[in-house]
Image: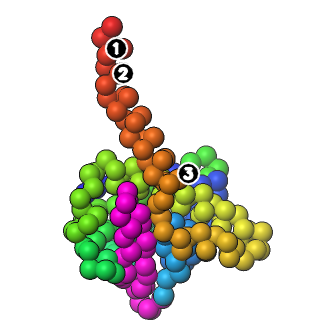
Amino acid sequence: MLISNDFEVAQPVSKVWEFFGDIPRVAACLPGAPPTENLGDDKYNGRVAVRMGPVRLQFAGTAEIAERDEAGKRIVVHATGAEERGRGQASMVVTASLTPAGSGTKVAVTQDLQLAGAAAQYGRGMISDVTAVLMRDFSANMASQIAAAERGEPVLAGAAQAAAAPAGGLAIGLRAALMALRRVFRRFFVPYQATS
């Protein structure tokens, strides 16, 4: 399943690219991802907890930087993991590309996601909506972490604790449901209005 998202960060490309060079800091910005362990040679151990509907999934696995294009400001990460209670596996290739956007940076993220087990029962729409919500939270966390680093402040403990909490729950579920309702509204009501 291919999922694409993009967002803008009010920081220059050079600052965002420098931030992307520190994978544990990047991972700490993703809701549901507690701190990662650096294994060396651009390999990392980590965990991600996601709640999708009534199911809470916690994956443990590894991520490896497969490509880092300094000139093109593009990074590719391969990640694989297994659900800790044996309810499935996930593998993902994440590609992030940075381009200037005014005085800030546009970050385009493509995820080629393969799921097996409990998470695979959810439709593409729900997975895409939850991913979009997580990307919004990730971009806000990343922007605040880059701004804090600019001010010489350390990574906030509260941000790390928030990242360690399972991604999902009521807030993300409601936001994803609203996105699905908007999609349904556009699909059924906008064509009707155009033909009236």
Quadrant containing the C terminus is: top left
Which mark is drawn over residue 194?
A: 1
Q: Which mark is residue 43?
A: none
Residue 177, how many percent across, how many down? 42, 44
Three-letter residue code for mark 2: Val
Name above or below for residue 1 compared with residue 26: above
Residue 163 x, y percent position in the rendering = 55, 70
Report the side of 78 relative to 23 (left or right). left
What's the residue at 67%, 72% (across, down)? 158
**Closer to the camera, 100 or 59?**
59
* Residue located beneath label 2 in the image: 190
Asked if the residue at tag 2 contacts the one at tag 3, i.e. Cβ–Cβ closer than 8 Å, the answer is no
Tell me whether the residue at label 2 lies in contact with that at label 1, contact meaning CB atoms closer than 8 angstroms: yes
Q: Which residue is mark 3?
A: 8
- Figure quadrant of residue 146: bottom right
Of the two numbered discs 3 and 2 on the same chain, state the one appearing first in sequence: 3
Quadrant of the frame with the N terminus: bottom left
Mark 3 neighbour class, 10 Å CA radius: few under 14, some 14 to 19, many 20 or more: some
Task: State the SS at label 3.
Answer: strand
Magenta stretch in the rendered image: 38-62
Q: Type of residue at label 1?
A: Ala
User: Mark 1: which secondary structure?
Assistant: helix
Q: Was residue 134 drawn as part of the magenta stretch in this picture?
A: no
Kind of residue indicated by mark 3:
Glu
Furthest-front residue in view? 54
Residue 56 highlighted magenta (yes or no) = yes
Classify 9 as above or below 69. above
Horizontally, residue 134 falls left or right of residue 116, namely: right
Judging depth in this view, the residue of 87 and 61 nearest the camera is 87
Is residue 20 visible to us here?
no
Q: Residues within 10 Å of mark 2 (few under 14, many from 20)?
A: few
